[in-house]
């Protein structure tokens, strides 16, 4: 039986005041992620994508809002629900989709699949299949920034399930001890791999997980891209000023199961529909755009059409791109 988590109130938290350009840009990027993930789900069902596939539908505002505060040279690292992060950092949807289908021109040459893609050019360091493994790696990126005194920060994303992993707290200790410029973004979508946070965590306010290390943290409405950006700016400034790490708990929600093989029977359809109907990040952005007269209905339909064309082109490319040559089996293998 589903155990619903009542999200703590974030009503009093500030939200960023978006310009017309920021609102439309955030809307387009969130919509691109949503359409990409919907297409990936379709292609998985058709047998074109194998292995694990974890969709980001519902959580788009988190990575889009955080990406708006980053500067050139900053790094992003995450777990295996990673397609949205790739698109938000500017990676080509064709290359991402081609990696999902295991093709030669995917970002990992067809050998990494859904969970293992990288782009140093875009500051994206994965995509990691081991739960919580990205946290010490992201801490290492922050250590490199600190060592080089380059003014950059690392953004390390992980979920409410990974928040119970031991290496997370070793990383927190090291980051605070050495005052590393690391922003830890906990994407709390309530259910980890299928267990409600109220049944798996003694402390459900994950923004408090750094208190024993003197790391400050905030809870954020992860369904509102403006709230995410405002919190991200605060955390980024803290890190860039040499004060050490910062924790942001993003209260968000995934509409699909943990992965494509998860029927998500641990929650009710009514719960999912309630979030979709009243808290969807894209619908809320669309409403604001229309209310502020930043764009008309026709203009938003045009954006949707352009995004659909982009994703259809990516799917077409990923379907017809050749598979890797057999010689790739021996590439990048250290002997």
Image (cartoon, rainbow, N blue to C red):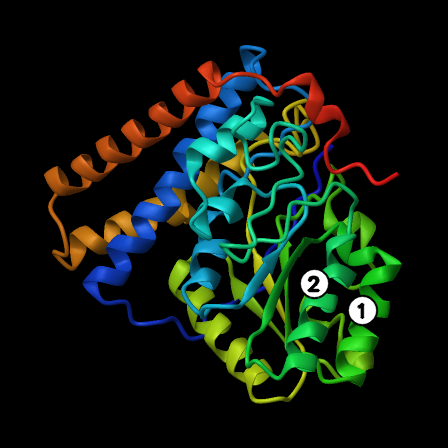
Can residue 205 be seen here? no
The residue lying at 69 percent from left, 17 percent from top is 326
Along the line of sight, the residue nearer the viewer: 3 or 104: 104
The percent position of residue 258, horizontal first and vertical second, equals 67, 34
- Residue 141 vs 115, above or below: the answer is below
The residue lying at 56 percent from left, 46 percent from top is 253
- Residue 14 vs 114, above or below: the answer is below
Along the line of sight, the residue nearer the viewer: 254 or 268: 254
Q: Secondary structure at mark 1?
A: helix
Direction from residue 271 to residue 93 in the image, left or right: left
The residue lying at 70 percent from left, 36 percent from top is 2
Along the line of sight, the residue nearer the viewer: 41 or 288: 41
Can residue 322 be seen here? yes
Question: On the rendered image, what quadrant is the N terminus found in?
Answer: top right
Residue 175 falls in image quadrant = bottom right
Q: Which mark is residue 171?
A: 1
Residue 102 falls in image quadrant = top right
Crowd band around label 1 with a 10 angstrom C-alpha radius: few (<14), some (14–19), many (20+): some
Residue 109 falls in image quadrant = top right
Q: Earlier in the sequence, mark 2 or mark 1?
A: 2
Q: Secondary structure at mark 2?
A: helix
User: Is there a contact, CB below 8 Å, between mark 2 and mark 1?
Assistant: yes
The percent position of residue 193, horizontal first and vertical second, equals 74, 39
- Residue 302 vs 148, above or below: the answer is above
Question: On the rendered image, what quadrant is the C terminus found in?
Answer: top right
Direction from residue 333 to residue 266 in the image, left or right: left
Tag in front: 2 or 1: 2
The percent position of residue 287, horizontal first and vertical second, equals 25, 50
Q: Which mark is residue 138?
A: 2
- Residue 303 vs 148, above or below: the answer is above
Q: CA distance from mark 2 to mark 1?
A: 9 Å
């Amino acid at each position: 039986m589903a155990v619903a988590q009542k999200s703590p109130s974030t009503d009093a938290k500030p939200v960023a005041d978006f310009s017309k350009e920021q609102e439309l840009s955030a809307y387009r990027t969130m919509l691109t992620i949503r359409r990409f993930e919907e297409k990936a789900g379709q292609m998985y069902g058709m047998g074109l994508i194998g292995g694990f596939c974890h969709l980001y539908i519902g959580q788009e505002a988190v990575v889009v809002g955080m990406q708006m505060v980053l500067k050139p040279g900053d790094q992003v690292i995450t777990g295996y629900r990673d397609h949205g992060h790739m698109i938000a950092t500017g990676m080509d949807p064709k290359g991402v989709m081609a990696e999902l289908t295991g093709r030669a021109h995917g970002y990992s040459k067809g050998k990494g699949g859904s969970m293992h893609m990288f782009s140093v050019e875009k500051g994206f360091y994965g995509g990691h299949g081991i739960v919580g493994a990205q946290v010490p790696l992201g801490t290492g990126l922050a250590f490199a920034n600190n060592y080089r005194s380059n003014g950059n920060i690392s953004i390390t994303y992980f979920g409410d399930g990974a928040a119970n992993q031991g290496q997370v707290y070793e990383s927190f200790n090291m980051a605070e001890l050495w005052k590393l410029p690391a922003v830890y973004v906990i994407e709390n979508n309530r259910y980890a791999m299928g267990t409600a946070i109220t049944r798996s965590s003694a402390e459900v306010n994950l923004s408090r997980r750094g208190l024993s290390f003197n790391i400050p943290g905030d809870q954020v409405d992860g369904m509102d891209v403006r709230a995410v950006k405002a919190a991200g700016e605060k955390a980024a400034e803290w890190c860039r000023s040499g004060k050490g790490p910062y924790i942001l708990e993003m209260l968000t929600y995934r509409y699909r199961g943990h992965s494509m093989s998860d029927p998500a029977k641990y929650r009710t359809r009514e719960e999912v529909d309630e979030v979709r109907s009243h808290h969807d990040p894209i619908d809320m952005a669309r409403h604001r755009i229309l209310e502020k007269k930043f764009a008309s209905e026709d203009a938003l339909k045009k954006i949707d059409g352009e995004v659909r064309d982009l994703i259809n082109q990516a799917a077409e490319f990923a379907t017809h791109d050749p598979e890797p040559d057999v010689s790739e089996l021996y590439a990048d293998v250290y002997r």
